[in-house]
Amino acid sequence: GCYAQLKPEEIANIHGVDLVLGAAEKFNITQHLKELTKSNVAKICSCDIEEVTAFNSSWSINDRTRTFLKVQDGCNYNCSFCTIPMARGKSRCDSINNIIAHATQLAKAGVKEIVLTGINLGDYLTPTFPLTPALSTSGEGEGRNFYSLIQALEKLDGIERFRISSIEPNLLTNDIIEFVANSNKFMPHFHIPLQSGSNKILGLMRRRYKKEVYIERVNLIKKLMPHCAIGVDVIVGFPGETETDFQETYDLLHSLDVSYLHVFTYSERENTAALHIAPVVPIKVRHERNKALRNLSYKKLNHFKEQHTGEIRKVLFEAQSRNGLMEGYTDNYIKITAFFKPELVNQIVDWKV
Ligand code: SF4
């Protein structure tokens, strides 16, 4: 992962380590293992992150029901708290034709739901690739951005559900929201990082939107899809975050019609611009703010579930049985637990929430 690219020597010095592979070389792991000879010194195979430009397709294969398919990697943004661009390199992505081919293969393996993932998914942008005629609606040159990708996937037979994992608010266009609202396959569920409800802090974080953009996106989603789940990433304790700034974040999240929060406590990362921002927020205060937002998240999630209790919604049940129980998710991402029934595994069924 990122650690091996950012600090290969540190890992090489850990007792028992034989080989450290950076961001590009990890995809050649089988070759490296074949060539590895026992030595007292760990071997480091890594290059400068600027040289990492290739896209390597990957997807999770441990759960036949739901698969995470990587369609984009790297990031061209420079958020002041983030080391990901240093560890994963510039933004790059798979071609639409390749993604369609992978999704077709997954459908044949019995997968019902694909979650599209990437480091900065909304920044999906390919050079001009002609689509195969069967998938193209207007011919050459189509299929260059994320909107084109989801249009192409909607036409694919075999996969019944798609989800968009996480998308920056500035890249979540009205086109994408309207498309999902009218789609039979893209689930009413978005995960949109906010990070702070204070425009001052968003500026210090070098995020590419103001809170007003975020509010607009949420309002449009809920206008078109009142049942839609919306998850939010938020960071507390960023340097310079005063009590007033935090309250602004809290009040915004309280007022927004979102379903759950992923709350992160800011922690210092080497070589990031945020290290030079003052004043630092004391650790104790960071934890108090984290707790306040986690409590808010708990209430929001309960409220969201209560809004849909009693409704009949489509649930995709997953394969694992734990203590005689099985789990699945509704279209709008409400987790359902039921008594295990083998005939429900990997089936989409109408279910009373
Ligand atoms: S926080 Fe996300 S958008 Fe910002 S630099 Fe990191 S990966 Fe890119």
Image (spheres, rainbow, N blue to C red):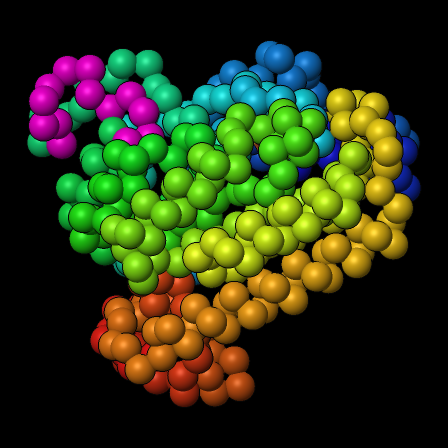
Q: Quadrant of residue 343?
A: bottom left
Report the span colored magenta.
135-147
Residue at 64% x, 47% y is 248
What residue is shown at x 85% (from left), y 29% (from top)?
278
Look at 53% across and 26% down and name the residue there: 208
Q: Quadrant of residue 199?
A: top right
Relative placement, left or right, of 9 versus 187 is right
Residue 282 can be seen in this image: yes
Pinpoint residue 171: horizontal percent, then vertical percent: 41, 30
- Figure check: 214 above or below 185: above
The answer to which of 234 and 246 lies nearer the viewer is: 246
| Identity of the residue drawn at 47% across and 71% down | 303
- Tell me, yes or no, whether the highlighted magenta stretch contains residue 208: no
Q: Position of residue 121 (x, y in %)?
A: 44, 34
Q: Main secondary structure of the magenta part?
A: loop
In the picture, measured across the screen, residue 51 lies left or right of residue 225, that is: right
Q: Residue furthest front?
A: 244
Residue 291 versus residue 324 in the image, above or below: above
| x then y, percent, for residue 150 | 27, 37
x then y, percent, for residue 321: 47, 79
**As rendered, which of 99 and 234 lies closer to the eye?**
234
Q: Nearer the viewer, residue 223 or 162?
A: 223
| Left or right of 76, for residue 151 | left
